[in-house]
Image: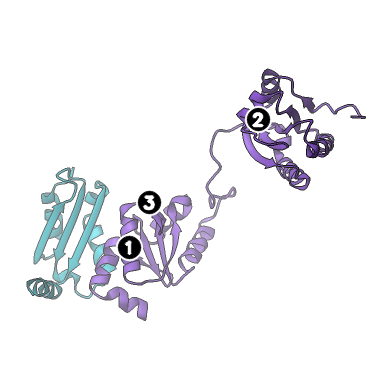
Chain colours: A cyan, B purple
């Protein structure tokens, strides 16, 4: 079983992280996860490239899950995202 | 009848007689003619049936007088005569109501065309291979060519589980909803129907899951990627370019 801590450690070891949210969407079973990562490492990468990147970073862990979903933003995009939410 | 009846022709005397004749060979095609002596059309159709019996010795022809053999007629839900029932063993292949000689002749010809008239040398309980499996081994180049052709079939192609009106997984359902919501025209392919496409695409696109969205022959992403691309405007840009 994969824990949120495992995932966080793997992500932080690979890229600088501004904001990170990890959610166990399998109601505590540790089988389905959704991650939200904000990092400058995503600058210049299109969406597919970012997702492939995270898939690679978490390859071993994802292989053990039933479902995995992700959302990736650059710091600038994250600021815009927060502004929109506050409006 | 002037001639002697051919050996594949039987006038059924009882339900037991009926069952024993049918059960002798469960691979055999049989034609059951439900008739009555008081119905004029039956007289003509009986002659047609006799001719068919002579022409197709591999078919078991059973003549059943519907009223005297009421139990048999009832078990086939025969309400009017003549009625013709075509079986393979106990399996219903077809049914013709009324004195339709051309339809009956056609049906017999069609059902006897297949190798059912040849006794099989082996049996299998396995279902037939899904389409696309092919009997010959597809080489890697052939598979790749086929995958590329499928991916380019339409400007936007969605490889999913099930089809857009009947998705077979939550992620596939969601991506269909998303595309429709965005007013994107897309073609689709059900990867559950073709194992080689299913596994081939995972390798070709280096993406382990379905659904997979392809635009202008190139892999774009799965549900997550497409969701993000809708949010950040990337998809719109891609489709308009």
Tags 3 and 2 touching, CB below 8 Å: no
Front label number (3 vs 2): 2
Q: Residue at x 78, y 25 (%)?
A: B10
Tag 1, which chain?
B
Quarter holding the C terminus of chain A is bottom left
Find residue B199 and name its label.
none
Q: Which mark is residue B89?
A: 2
Q: Is residue B235 above or below residue B13?
A: below
Q: Earlier in the sequence, mark 2 or mark 1?
A: 2
In this image, B113 relative to A22: left or right?
right
Label 3 SS: loop
Q: Earlier in the sequence, mark 3 or mark 1?
A: 3
Across and down, in percent, residue A7 comes to 15, 53
Tag of residue B177: 1
Spatial separation of the CA atoms under disc 2 and disc 1: 47 Å
Residue B36 in view here: yes
Residue B56: percent from left, percent from top: 80, 36
- Which one is earlier in the sequence, the residue at label 3 or at label 2? 2
Residue at the spot of label 3: B168
Front residue (pair A18, B212)? B212
Q: Residue placed farthest to the front in the image?
A: B38
In the picture, measured across the screen, residue B181 lies left or right of residue B108, that is left
Quadrant assignment, res B215? bottom left
Q: Position of residue B36 (x, y in %)?
A: 76, 31
Question: In percent of the image, x 71 and y 36: which residue is there?
Answer: B81
């Amino acid at each position: 079983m994969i824990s949120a801590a495992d995932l966080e450690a793997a992500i932080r070891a690979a890229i600088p992280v501004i904001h990170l949210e990890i959610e166990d969407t399998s109601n505590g079973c540790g089988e389905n996860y959704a991650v939200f990562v904000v990092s400058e490492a995503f600058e210049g990468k299109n969406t597919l490239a970012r997702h492939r990147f995270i898939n690679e970073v978490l390859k071993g862990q994802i292989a053990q899950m039933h479902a995995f979903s992700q959302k990736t933003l650059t710091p600038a995009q994250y600021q815009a995202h927060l502004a929109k939410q506050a409006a | 009848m002037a001639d002697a009846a051919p050996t594949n022709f039987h006038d059924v005397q009882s339900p037991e007689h009926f069952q024993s004749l049918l059960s002798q060979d469960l691979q055999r095609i049989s034609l059951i003619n439900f008739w009555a002596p008081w119905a004029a059309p039956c007289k003509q159709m009986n002659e047609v049936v006799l001719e068919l019996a002579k022409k197709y010795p591999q078919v078991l022809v059973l003549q059943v007088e519907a009223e005297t053999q009421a139990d048999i007629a009832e078990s086939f839900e025969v309400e009017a005569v003549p009625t013709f029932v075509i079986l393979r063993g106990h399996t219903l292949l077809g049914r013709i109501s009324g004195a339709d000689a051309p339809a009956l002749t056609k049906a017999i010809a069609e059902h006897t065309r297949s190798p059912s008239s040849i006794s099989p040398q082996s049996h299998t309980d396995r279902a037939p291979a899904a389409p696309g499996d092919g009997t010959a081994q597809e080489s890697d180049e052939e598979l790749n060519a086929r995958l590329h052709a499928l991916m380019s079939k339409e400007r936007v192609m969605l490889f999913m589980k099930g089809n857009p009106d009947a998705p077979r997984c939550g992620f596939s359902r969601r991506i269909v909803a998303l595309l429709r919501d965005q007013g994107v025209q897309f073609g689709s392919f059900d990867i559950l129907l073709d194992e080689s496409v299913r596994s081939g695409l995972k390798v070709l696109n280096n993406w382990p899951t379905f659904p997979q969205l392809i635009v202008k022959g190139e892999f774009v992403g799965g549900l997550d990627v497409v969701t993000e691309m809708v949010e950040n405007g990337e998809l719109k840009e891609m489709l308009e370019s």
